[in-house]
Amino acid sequence: MNLSGRNVQRAAVYVFHDPNKIVDRYVPVFLAELKRFTAHLLVVVNGEVNDEGKALLESVADDILIRPNEGYDITGYKKGIERIGWKNLKQYDELILVNSTLYGPIYPFDEMFKTMSRKKVDFWGITKHHKVDFDVFGTCKYGYVPEHIQSSFLVIRKPMLTGIFFRRRWEQLPEIHSYGEAIGFFEVIFTKEANEAGFKSAVYVDTDDLEGYTRYPLMMMSDELIINRKCPVMKQKSFSQNYYDIITDTIGNATADTFEHIRNNTDYDVNLIWDNILRTSNMDDIKKEMHLNYILPRDQMLEKQETYPAPYRPAEGKKRVALMMHLYYPDLVDYMLDYARRMPEDADLIVSSPNKETLRIFEEKTKGMKFGKIIALPMGNRGRDVSAVLVALKPYINDYRYICFVHDKKTVQTKPYANGRGFAYKCMECNLGSRTYIENIIETFERNPRLGMLMPPSPNHGNFYQIVGQEWASNYTNTLALGYKLKLNVNINPNKEPITPLGTMFWFRPEALRTLIDYPWTYEDFPKEPNGWDGTLLHAVERIYGFVVQHEGYYPAWVMHDHFASMEVTNLAFDLRELNTALLPKYPTGNLFDMTKTLRERMTLTWGSPRIAGLKMAFPNLPPFVKKCGKKAYHIYNKLRGR
């Protein structure tokens, strides 16, 4: 049988599912390439799809089956096979089973089909998962996970396709009620069963030499597979995999290195990936997998690029940059203006303040300063720096391509006051460290059209140490309520860090905050002074910033200059070493996962659950019903979003 050309008769069953009924652009791109090699392309939709998505699928598919979202992709394959019909399948040389968890083709499928046509096998796939000595999901009949071809792309040839083994395998497939059953009842056992029945198999990307390096090459070593072995697909979950899995087995480079290679060395449009992951994944996962941290030179200018990637370029006709400041304390005007002088001379300086004396001092001090324009805005004394952005400064925001927003900061609720001074230093240095650094920030926005916001990392020194791991504080439910009010369609999870500027000082492009800025805020929306120390609308907005950026199709990221980053690395390494020095003698473990697992088990014995333990330690005076409402609100919010 000659399987090398496009004249090979292939049928394909593509199983698609999206909880929000949306078909992102990566799907029709994948299907259009697959269509080149198939005579009949059936798309099986598990669940529902909106009208626009259905039209996209109809533009490439020969047939569409919309069915209840039951049984995961494996049952979708079964229903697709039944839709084509066993009798009709006999006319095809190959049947392709593939699902929507893959991005690609990163490289055209021509070489893959040509290479596999020379393999004398009965079924094949693109990649395989290596053997695991235990049963991860507790659903595999062997009690361990055999080496197997991954079912996200599986090709069955005629001898097997028309035989009794393959048909009986589907007819006897039990009902599948969970992801673990989908894995255990089919994916991890099919290859072994078929091989034992006498059918030969192979994979396009050979990873036998990686046995012992990783059990899951396409996830943990995607850089090796895609860069060096020309694997044509990348897993969707590479951008949302539990980072514990990543850091336990690897140093964490695979997804970021792979993405960079795809962007710089292939014709695949990485905006297809951005569109999908920003809509479906939690920003904390994306940031970790992609290492969205920019360490920029403080004293050396980045080389300007002659051309910049598209789309998502800011509209022409806008001024390049503005510094927007909110000032309250008269004694901090000089401190803030020292940083303001680091802005490029073509920048505008716009300041808001509810304090007349502060505005007077500001206007006096800025006489003769080199800025494009200098504007002083009186404002109401409600909402502080948040209402400054959303009310006072709002009329000016859309006039600029890029904006830096900062405010004077005194943290007097904790002692020593040097703690608060350090927090302010971190915010100001990471935003306005030097004129060269500021130009490098602007250049970074230009080079990365999906970058919507840059911010300092969260504070982690002194009394702010407790913020790491408790970034939500008591602001999860009010942030959810605000997200619902703004109709944000993003993943907000109480167990994930909000990637947002704690301290509310940041760089942004106005397009990335459109939904928040365009909302008709008034000063009366914000609490009267004295403002609460936590749990108010101000604190919800502080945490919603990054989610708004994501909702608009951009990503937020951390930024530091190189001199500050050297200090940050010292502090974080010191923190980790001190924790290990205290914990390892009592809880000797080999990796972070084992350590945290041990500690959580100890906390469960003491408190009932790690989450309740954290809440009780952080907020000992909260009533019990408040401590429980976070998880409930999370489920209600995601139910309203259709998740």
Image: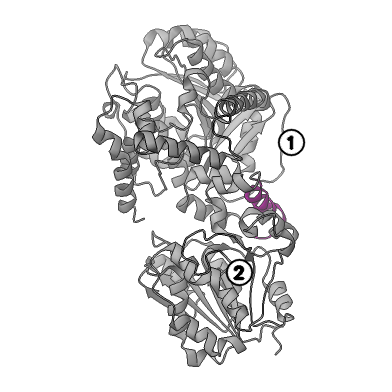
**Residue 65 belongs to magenta span:** no
Q: Is residue 451 left or right of residue 636?
A: right
Name the amino acid type tagged 1: Glu
Q: Nearer the viewer, mark 1 or mark 2?
A: 2
Residue tagged by mark 1? 303
Q: For mark 2, give the secondary structure.
A: strand
* Local crowd size for mark 1, using a 10 Å CA cut-off: few (<14), some (14–19), many (≥20): few
In terms of depth relative to the viewer, which is nearer, 612 or 518?
Answer: 612
* Residue 507 visible: yes
> Where the C terminus falls, by quadrant?
bottom left
Q: Residue 144, position in %: x, y?
A: 55, 64
Q: Main secondary structure of the magenta part?
A: helix
Q: Residue 165, position in %: x, y?
A: 54, 86
Distance between the alpha carbons at the discs numbered 1 and 2: 47 Å
Please tell me which residue is depicted at 61% across the width and 89% down the height of the picture.
Answer: 159
State which region is magenta. Answer: 253-268
The disc at residue 326 is none
Q: Is residue 116 left or right of residue 73?
A: right
> Where the N terminus falls, by quadrant?
bottom right
Please tell me which residue is depicted at 63% across the width and 27% down the height of the picture.
Answer: 573
Q: Residue 545, position in %: x, y?
A: 43, 36
Residue tagged by mark 2? 148
